[in-house]
């Protein structure tokens, strides 16, 4: 049975794909949005400490499930078949909204220098570091659009390092937590510039949904009161509302189809009943996040594209990156815990750039509210592992500790990569992603520096003892929920996969629109940048396709 | 450190039976004449002594009372099925180590002997013969982590009975659905 031809088929309904679906559908394009997972609602929220996206010791809440293994190659070359609950899998949720259903929802704009790292710092040995083909100014209007359409609360006016913005955030920050009140004056005494973190979370009623009720089940969980703003409760419903967008869930895309002349003609996918379907379209957009988008391009082989789509110069899947997280935990003589979610509320950007001895850096913020098991299972030198001493530690410090952490901007490494495995296949018989590589030495230097800064901040805040999170390991590729970099955006087809409008260099109607296109990933959670790029790429896509869909 | 309560066989059986009954009869992934889904009575007794060393009772209840053995038993017939063999082998090896070192099964040792023996397992210094198939350090890491899950995790999975650990940390239980908004400070105007 052949399905009705449409203008655009979008693979993946996360931060990127959801935005593209809405932009195209509103412009009159007929759109099919394919999602491998299910559509969850706030009623599906389980508040399960051991089974969510952050802590998945008993499984994850929003997928993918065990039918989707990956292969991970460790630093000594051994291959492991890993399931989605394994750390080395680098999971990102598989559901409508993707990671935005259950994320912590920090909404960062990258800084101007994040787009020009090579011009700022020069070449870095062992890294493919390069400038972006676009600048912050190109993205600024789209950052603003993401902030207002999807919804961001916070107040970064005190952040003197932020890139210029034309319009303030649409919602005020949530009232400060006790941690915030302890950390803010301490940062000011140190001459730092603390501010309220921008978050994709309603602090007041917005967009027809209510405000955050400040429960402790936040990062890793879907929001019970629907106050967290993702693509699943903003742009995707709007796309469907136009009547031009059909969302199909539990569809596993096998490959992107191409014609003899080298154009994309649609996708082949297995529907929720396991039947192979073919959806033809004028345009194909891959928005599956860095690992799965690369896998999809690499799995789409044909006579014209024997190494996969966009892979003429062997750049698809390269430069896989995420964030090296680092920081410190401060132990206090008094209570710091007030049981108010989301927890993270105050940050500094004093150390994102301009540090000596290494390239770039990252923001530092107090951590999301921690559940008892997360706290009790935290290991570091100086924290007892078990026994009466451990129980005492948990009892004494669960409510009297503050954790300051931050994401270090990683240096892209050519050998950190996604390939398709020659042997292992998933439940549908599609070759799985194979992850291998290592981190760059600069990541270690930067994280050590940031830990020391987190320590200084906590000491100034009155912590009696401060415990470092310890040096990071450079083994294995990075990735995780912040995965990025595998289909780099660039002007030169020999050293990138997509052009500056996210179009694959050698296929004129195929786009990759998600974190894959980031040449580097900022010292920030990348989601708002992914959304901004999706708005930006959609706008340019529609300019070049005038007349399409205006039926 | 506080000496932990040692359970004699009869007291333990009572705890075990109560826990099994509470968890609902008929869920069994083994037929060994034991009230547990996976463990034999001896295995459960050894594990109970271990988890009460990992989270010992003091002014707050310990891991056994909180139902950690029940939690692990349940998960071994669920998501932790692949670890069944490691537990079967590891628990036998713990008892063998007790026999080799002190001439007694682990559960019959003095509390300080149990504590020292577990430290030996953690450091991989346990007598070699019993630990050929799985390293003692790896097995012990599993038990520690699963004990933390069973004690501090959500009660729906069979541990953290009556939310004891959450009460210990002064966290309201059951989870509050919606807060009284008047309790909260007003958002700052932006």
Image (spheres, rainbow, N blue to C red):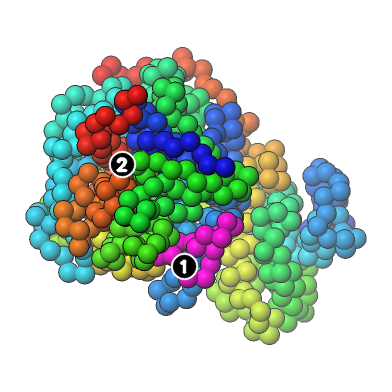
Q: Nearer the viewer, residue A289 or A266?
A: A266
> Which residue is at a point 18% across and 34% down the rendered structure image?
A140
Question: For this view, does A292 lie left or right of residue A271?
Answer: left
- Callout 2: residue from which chain? A
Find residue A530 and name its label: 2
- Callout 1: residue from which chain? A
- Above or below: residue A463 compared with residue A315: above
Farthest-out residue, top: B182
Residue B116: image x %, image y %? 62, 71
Q: Nearer the viewer, residue A57 or A493?
A: A493
Residue B28: image x %, image y %? 83, 54
The quarter in which the C terminus of chain A is drawn is: top left
Q: Are marks 1 and 2 in contact (CB under 8 Å)?
A: no
User: Quadrant location of residue B83?
Assistant: bottom right
> Which residue is at a point 32% across and 47% down the rendered structure image?
A510
> Which residue is at a point 60% across and 43% down the rendered structure image?
A272
Question: For this view, does A311 lie left or right of residue A217?
Answer: left
The quarter in which the N terminus of chain A is drawn is: top right
Residue A172: image x %, image y %? 30, 22
Farthest-out residue, front: A260
Magenta region, mostly helix, strand or loop?
strand
User: Quadrant location of residue A475?
Assistant: bottom left
Instruction: Identify the residue position indicated by label 1 in the image.
Output: A421
Residue A370 colored in magenta in the image: no
Residue A153: image x %, image y %? 32, 26
Q: From which residue to which does the magenta span run?
A: A418-433
Number of numbered discs present? 2
Mark 1 surroundings within 10 Å by alpha-carbon count, few (fewer than 14), some (14 through 19), many (20 or more): some
């Amino acid at each position: 049975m052949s399905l009705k031809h449409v203008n655009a088929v979008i693979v993946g309904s996360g931060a990127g794909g959801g935005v593209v679906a809405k932009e195209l559908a509103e412009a009159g394009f007929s759109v099919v949005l394919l999602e491998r997972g299910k559509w969850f609602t706030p009623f599906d929220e389980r508040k399960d400490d051991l089974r969510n996206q952050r802590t998945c010791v008993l499984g994850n809440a929003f997928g993918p499930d065990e039918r989707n293994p990956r292969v991970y190659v460790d630093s000594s070359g051994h291959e492991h078949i890993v399931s989605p609950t394994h750390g080395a899998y680098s999971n990102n949720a598989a559901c409508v909204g993707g990671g935005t259903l259950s994320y912590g929802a920090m909404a960062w704009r990258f800084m101007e220098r994040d787009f020009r790292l090579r011009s700022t710092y020069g070449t870095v040995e062992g890294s493919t570091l390069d400038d972006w083909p676009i600048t912050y100014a190109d993205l600024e209007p789209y950052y603003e659009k993401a902030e207002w359409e999807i919804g961001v609360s916070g107040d970064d006016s005190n952040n003197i390092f932020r890139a210029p913005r034309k319009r303030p955030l649409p919602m005020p920050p949530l009232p400060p937590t006790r941690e915030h009140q302890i950390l803010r004056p301490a940062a000011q005494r140190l001459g730092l510039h603390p501010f309220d973190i921008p978050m994709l979370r309603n602090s007041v009623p917005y967009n027809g949904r209510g405000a955050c009720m400040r429960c402790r089940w936040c990062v890793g969980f879907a929001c019970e009161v629907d106050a967290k703003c993702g693509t699943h409760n903003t742009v995707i419903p709007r796309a469907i509302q136009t009547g031009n967008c059909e969302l199909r869930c539990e569809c596993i895309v096998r490959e992107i189809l191409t014609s003899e002349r080298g154009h994309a003609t649609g996708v082949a996918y297995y529907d929720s009943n396991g039947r192979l379907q073919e959806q033809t379209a004028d345009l194909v957009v891959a928005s599956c996040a860095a690992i799965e988008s690369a896998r999809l391009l690499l799995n789409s082989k044909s006579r014209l594209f024997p190494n996969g789509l966009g892979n003429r110069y062997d750049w698809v899947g390269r430069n896989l990156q995420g964030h090296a997280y680092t920081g410190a935990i401060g132990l206090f003589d008094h209570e710091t815990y007030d049981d108010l979610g989301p927890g993270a509320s105050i940050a500094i950007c004093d150390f994102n750039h301009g540090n000596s001895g290494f390239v770039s850096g990252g923001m530092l913020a107090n951590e999301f509210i921690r559940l008892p098991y997360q706290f009790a299972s935290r290991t570091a030198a100086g924290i007892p592992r078990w026994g009466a001493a451990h129980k005492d530690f948990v009892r004494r410090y669960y409510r009297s500790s503050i954790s300051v952490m931050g994401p270090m901007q990683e240096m892209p490494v050519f050998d950190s990569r996604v390939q398709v495995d020659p042997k292992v296949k998933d439940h549908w018989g599609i070759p799985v992603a194979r992850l291998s590589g290592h981190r760059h030495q600069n990541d270690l230097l930067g994280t050590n520096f940031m830990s020391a800064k987190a320590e200084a901040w906590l000491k100034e805040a009155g912590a009696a003892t401060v415990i470092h999170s310890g040096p990071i390991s450079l083994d294995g590729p990075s990735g995780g929920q912040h995965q990025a970099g595998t289909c780099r955006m660039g002007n030169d087809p020999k050293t990138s996969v997509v052009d500056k409008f996210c179009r694959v260099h050698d296929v004129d109607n195929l786009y990759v629109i998600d974190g894959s296109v980031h040449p580097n990933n900022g010292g920030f959670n990348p989601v708002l940048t992914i959304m901004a790029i999706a708005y930006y790429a959609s706008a340019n896509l529609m300019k070049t396709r005038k007349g399409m869909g205006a039926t | 450190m506080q000496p932990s309560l040692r359970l004699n066989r009869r007291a333990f059986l009572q705890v075990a039976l109560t826990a099994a009954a509470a968890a609902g009869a008929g869920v069994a992934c083994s037929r060994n004449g034991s009230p547990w889904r996976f463990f034999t009575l001896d295995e459960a007794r050894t594990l109970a002594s271990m988890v009460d060393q990992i989270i010992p009772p003091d002014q707050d209840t310990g891991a056994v009372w909180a139902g950690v053995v029940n939690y692990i038993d349940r998960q071994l017939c669920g998501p932790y099925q692949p670890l069944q063999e490691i537990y079967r082998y590891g628990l036998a090896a713990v008892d063998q180590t007790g026999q080799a070192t002190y001439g007694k099964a682990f559960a019959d040792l003095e509390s300080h002997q149990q504590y020292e023996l577990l430290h030996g397992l953690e450091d991989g210094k346990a007598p070699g013969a019993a630990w050929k198939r799985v390293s003692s350090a790896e097995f012990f890491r599993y038990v520690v982590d699963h004990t933390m899950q069973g004690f501090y995790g959500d009660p729906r999975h069979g541990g953290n009975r009556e939310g004891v650990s959450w009460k210990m940390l002064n966290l309201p239980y059951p989870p509050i659905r919606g807060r009284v908004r008047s309790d909260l400070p007003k958002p700052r105007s932006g």
